[in-house]
Image (cartoon, rainbow, N blue to C red):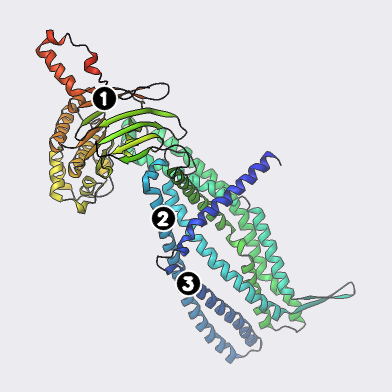
């Protein structure tokens, strides 16, 4: 087999696997044992409505025969009677249609809600929503997959199931009607009499097969084209979202022209994908429109010989035409639904890709895949790093073999040049970075609080933003107001209930002050602060750090920063240095001892001069293991 053939087989197998993976989770809505039984109740209700609609269709088919026979016989009483019957049938059909739409959309809504909840549980647990950004795989733009693709993936199958059940039952019922009404067709050819039994049935089946086969042939690329179109739409939406979220920085730098170019490039990709899918839609429309026009006239032409020789009445011809149309629609169900089926398949595979990526993370959490950092508890210290190494997913080392013990209430500053892995080490301590070796032991992980360099500001009121991540109704309002005042945001206290885009309203310094207010409200046992004063001036940094030391005396603080002025607020300094095999923890400095030495040197210069510098900057008894 050629390389292209192998690639096509692989792609086909991959697509089938992804669809099976989607159904493995999605059908759980009907398999749940301890949940509500509304899924089966609604499914049974929809099936009953399909059967009732089929009965109405059969009655309307019989009505066609009776009505046109009455017209042919010029029977005014019969015509009036049939008009009354049609009115009753119409009212019943409308009622069944309304109930059917409500039941169908209800099961779509509840199925989507169930599957959305399940995916959110799997996505948000154990920081997987963050770790997916660190690993490779086909799971880009998960928000689009959850919001839009999941909607299509749960709406379409319900419509398909209802349509397919209706098509099968209609085909069986009205094939019997066609066989009964049409009977056999006899004609002479080359002096021989040829009889075709059930000629209307044979014509309907052959016609449907030709139409469906043609649709499959012209639309064979519909699924692939739909998937690429959805991906292009997701990427375009992401570009626009990034533009909105970074509007201030872009405006200050005057980058609107460059952003316009990026947006136009992304939108150009969308237009090219839409052009591809438009060509597929044009081909599908040609087939469906041609099929619809021929289906309307073909049964009448087939019945014309029997009507002209008097073996069929006008009512029977119209009944046969109505039944033929129903059978043709039922048998050509694929013709009408193939484009939407392609759209569903593309969306289901995108949702499945996210599921598969989450499966891979879950498998790695269970011990399959790259080595992962262990997490445990300790009562002997606030934090212990036991031979900790931090690596990338592929095993590339970032930080090597670190041994550190931080006692309760101790303040430790982590420093080092940019790119030495400080942030990766902090993420490993917090449990966000999983890959590596060794163990992180914490006194109580539930009482750990992380303050990032760029504080997250959720959508909502300032009250909610200040209390975050604790719900606002679980925090005393007066406590929130006091926290804002002591961190220098007293002018915002009167605006606690304002619901505006605070993410864009607050400056970088105000956001960092707000983060300190959150810290005062939470009062954790362990705090990890990553460049939390980078947007503040030195005086504000001094005031806020002194505030934290005063209000959280017994809290263990681990800070990351570059400013040398930060050393005045910490007891120890851990310094990372880059090496070819990853960063190493090179020095463990007792900053309190350094401060004492500095004070002695300033007071007694002659005495301090005899002290060797190594005794100031190096503490072998507390240093990390250097390898």
Which residue is the site of mark 2? 118
Vertical side of 38 occupied by 579: above or below: above
Q: Between 147 and 261, which is closer to the camera in this rendering?
A: 147
Q: Is residue 198 visible?
A: yes
Residue at the limit of the structure toward the left, as seen here = 603
Q: Quadrant of the N terminus?
A: top right
Q: In terms of secondary structure, where does tag 2 sit?
A: helix
Quarter location, residue 329: bottom right
Separation (CA) of disc 1 from disc 2: 47 Å
The residue shown at (16%, 37%) is: 554
Q: Between 415 and 58, which is closer to the camera in this rendering?
A: 415
Would residue 518 be found to the left or right of residue 431 on screen? Answer: left
Q: Position of residue 325 (x, y in %)?
A: 64, 72
Which residue is the site of mark 1? 622
Q: Is residue 251 visible?
A: no
The residue shown at (65%, 79%) is: 319
**In front: label 1 or label 3:** 1
Would residue 515 be found to the left or right of residue 438 on screen? Answer: left
Identify the mark at residue 100; answer none if there is no mark: 3
Would residue 39 be found to the left or right of residue 546 on screen? Answer: right
Identify the mark at residue 556; answer none if there is no mark: none
> How packed is label 1: few (under 14 Cα within 10 Å), some, or many (20 or more)?
some
**In front: label 3 or label 2:** 2
Of callouts 3 and 2, the N-terminal one: 3
Do tag 1 and tag 3 residues touch (Cβ < 8 Å)?
A: no
Vertical side of 552 occupied by 571: above or below: above
């Amino acid at each position: 087999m050629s390389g292209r053939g192998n690639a096509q087989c692989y792609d086909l197998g991959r697509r089938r696997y992804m669809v099976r993976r989607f159904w493995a989770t999605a059908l759980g809505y009907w398999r749940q044992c301890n949940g509500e039984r509304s899924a089966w109740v609604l499914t049974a209700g929809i099936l009953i409505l399909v059967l009732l609609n089929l009965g109405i269709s059969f009655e309307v088919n019989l009505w066609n025969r009776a009505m046109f026979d009455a017209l042919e016989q010029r029977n005014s009483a019969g015509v009036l009677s049939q008009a009354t019957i049609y009115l009753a049938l119409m009212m019943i059909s409308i009622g069944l249609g309304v109930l059917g739409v409500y039941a169908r959309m209800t099961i779509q809504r509840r199925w989507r809600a169930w599957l959305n909840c399940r995916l959110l549980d799997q996505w948000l647990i154990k920081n997987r929503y963050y770790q997916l950004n660190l690993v490779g795989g086909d799971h880009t733009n998960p928000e689009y997959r959850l919001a839009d693709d999941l909607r299509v993936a749960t709406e379409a199958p319900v419509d398909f199931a209802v349509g397919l059940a209706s098509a099968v039952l209609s085909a069986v019922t009205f094939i019997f009607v066609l066989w009964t009404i049409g009977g056999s067709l006899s004609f002479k050819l080359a002096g021989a009499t040829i009889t075709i039994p059930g000629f209307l049935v044979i014509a309907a089946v052959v016609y449907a097969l030709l139409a469906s086969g043609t649709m499959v042939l012209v639309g064979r690329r519909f699924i692939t084209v739909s998937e690429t179109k959805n991906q292009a739409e997701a990427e375009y939406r992401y570009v626009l979202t990034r533009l909105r979220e970074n509007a201030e920085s872009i405006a200050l730098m005057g980058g609107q022209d460059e952003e316009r170019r990026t947006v136009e490039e992304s939108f150009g990709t969308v237009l090219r994908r839409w052009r591809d899918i438009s060509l597929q839609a044009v081909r599908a429309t040609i087939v469906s429109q041609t099929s619809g026009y021929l289906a309307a006239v073909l049964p009448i032409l087939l019945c014309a010989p029997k009507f002209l020789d008097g073996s069929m009445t006008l009512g029977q011809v119209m009944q046969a035409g109505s039944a033929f149309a129903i059978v043709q629609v039922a048998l050509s169900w694929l013709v009408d639904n193939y484009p939407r089926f392609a759209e569903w398949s593309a969306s289901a595979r995108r949702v499945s890709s996210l599921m598969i990526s989450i499966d891979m993370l879950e498998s790695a959490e269970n011990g399959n895949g790259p080595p992962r950092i262990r997490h445990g508890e300790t009562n002997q210290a606030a934090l212990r790093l036991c031979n900790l190494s931090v690596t990338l997913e592929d095993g590339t080392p970032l930080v090597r073999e670190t041994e550190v013990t931080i006692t309760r209430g101790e303040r430790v500053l982590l420093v080092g040049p940019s790119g030495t892995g400080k942030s990766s080490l902090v993420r490993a301590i917090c449990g966000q970075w999983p890959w590596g070796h060794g163990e992180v032991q914490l006194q109580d992980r539930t009482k750990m609080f992380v303050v990032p360099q760029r504080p997250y500001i959720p959508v909502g009121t300032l009250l909610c933003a200040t209390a975050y991540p604790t719900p606002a109704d679980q925090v005393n309002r007066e406590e929130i107001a006091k926290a804002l005042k002591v961190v220098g945001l007293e002018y915002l206290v009167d605006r606690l209930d304002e619901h505006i885009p605070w993410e864009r309203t607050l400056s970088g310094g105000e956001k960092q002050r707000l983060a300190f207010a959150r810290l005062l409200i939470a009062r954790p046992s362990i705090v990890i602060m990553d460049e939390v004063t980078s947007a503040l001036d030195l005086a504000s940094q001094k005031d806020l750090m002194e505030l934290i030391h005063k209000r959280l005396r017994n809290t263990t603080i681990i800070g990351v920063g570059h400013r040398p002025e930060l050393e005045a607020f910490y007891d120890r300094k851990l310094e990372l240095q880059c090496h070819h095999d990853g960063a190493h923890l090179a020095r463990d400095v007792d900053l309190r001892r350094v401060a004492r030495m500095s004070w002695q040197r300033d007071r007694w210069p002659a005495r301090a001069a005899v002290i060797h510098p190594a005794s100031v900057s190096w503490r072998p008894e507390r240093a990390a293991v250097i390898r």
